[in-house]
Image (tube, rainbow, N blue to C red):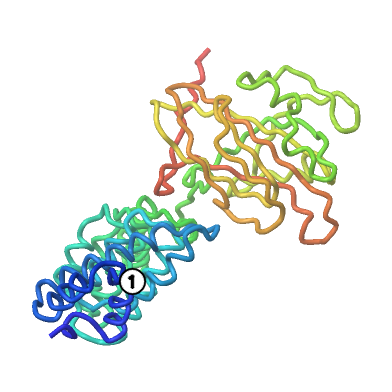
Amino acid sequence: MLNIYFSQQFRFSLCRLLPFHGSVLTTVVIFLCIFSSPACGRLWADDLLQRALSSVRSVDVNGQGHAAAVPAMKIINTAAIEQVPEILLGMDGANRLATNWLRSAVLSIVDRGGELPRAKIETYFAETTHSHLGRLLAFDLLTENDQALAEKIIPTLSDDPSLPLRAKAIEWQIKQAELATQPVEKVGLLATALDKARSIEQVQKIAKLLGDNGIAVDLQKQLGFLKSWHLVGSFDNQKQAGFDVAYGPEKELPKIDLAASFTNLAAEDANWTLHTSNSTVGVLNLNQLIGKIKGATVYATTTFDADQAQTVELRIGTPNATKVWVNGALVMSNEIYHNSNSIDKFSGTANFKAGKNEILLKICQNEQTEPWAQDWEFQLRVCDATGKAIQPVPLVVAQE
């Protein structure tokens, strides 16, 4: 009866893990228990699976725990299809590497065939605190051969904390807007989708559609980009040595004095100068504003007036090495040059206080001469953990 619960490979793995260091009698008793009692066999299988999941969850991107995770994955890959919900639960709190391994195991198990435990997977999917990628996998399992179910679920996901699931709902809303024949209905559907969207690409797509219908969208504000910055520089970064050198603005932290003057790379006085981005996504091009200088460092600062104390995400897009401070506390440090230049490339969590918060950036350019290594720029936005923009308190101008 054991093969009701275990494949041949699984039983082989099980036998290898039996406590051979114990007495022969103990081993015989364990085997009799497993082969004579389905309930005992199930308990043993569940315990073995949990131990394997624990090993896989312990692996990290630097390879630590890899040796134990490899045999553990062999056990997970041979689990029964009834145990898929347990593997999905194992994704909760797992890092991206472990999550990808477990996702691969689930797909392998399902491909072998058998009746999917739909009720348990539906329960898992319904609980939004579970792993976002695990819930996406659960959705795919439930709807793979059930388009009607997919069409029923997707419209309900526009507020889902799982961004891949939310994106499905937003794409559905965009299609509904495109199908609408009345301009008022079309604009209303697009406006709702814009409010719910968190994907940069979807926000840009919706903004274009609204623009085509006569409604202008301020993408800088919609996405939370900070557009006005004071810049000062440039300072030395020859041989990339300046990243960990505290130049004038950094030495003064937590204070930022916009009236201060510093000595720059050219042994000249350098003062803070205000610049405002005209880019729809908040980019400031330092080659244009400071000069096309190699092996150099620039500081940028701005303030954010928060309506209350709160935890926020600062998301920066830049091809250059950067550090970011908020109110004197370092929240981000990335010494990476020219591996890509995308929105939200790096993110860091910061604690804003109610009122004025001072943000300081350090942007370092290296000395590479390749054409693709010439960009020196940055963009930064403030948002919550889902990517929704957090807006500063509007500046109130006193009336004469």
Q: Which residue is drawn at 68% across and 52% down?
A: 319
Choose top left, top right, bottom left or bottom right for residue 130.
bottom left
Give the quadrant of the N terminus. bottom left
Q: Residues within 10 Å of mark 1 (few under 14, many from 20)?
A: few
Residue 314 seen in the current view:
yes
The residue at which mark 1 appears reads as 179
User: What's the residue at 78%, 24% (across, down)?
Assistant: 271
Q: Nearer the viewer, residue 37 or 241?
A: 37
Relative image position of residue 289 (x, y in whole percent): 77, 40
Q: Could you say where residue 80 lies in the image, as x and y percent from the top left?
A: 23, 78
Q: In this rendering, would 125 be left or right of 53?
A: left
**Residue in the picture at 61% in, 45% down:** 379
Of all residues, the one furthest to the right in this rendering is 267
Place of residue 43 in the rendered image (x, y in percent of width and height, measured from the top left):
16, 68
In the rendered view, tell whether residue 28 sits above or below residue 375.
Answer: below
Residue 180 in sight from this viewpoint: no
Q: Tell whether 162 sits left or right of 391.
A: left
Q: Is residue 193 above or below residue 227?
A: below
Nearer the observer, 254 or 227: 254
Residue at the spot 25% in from the left edge and 73% down from the top edge = 150
SS class, disc 1: helix
Amino acid under disc 1: Leu
- Quick check: 137 left or right of 279? left
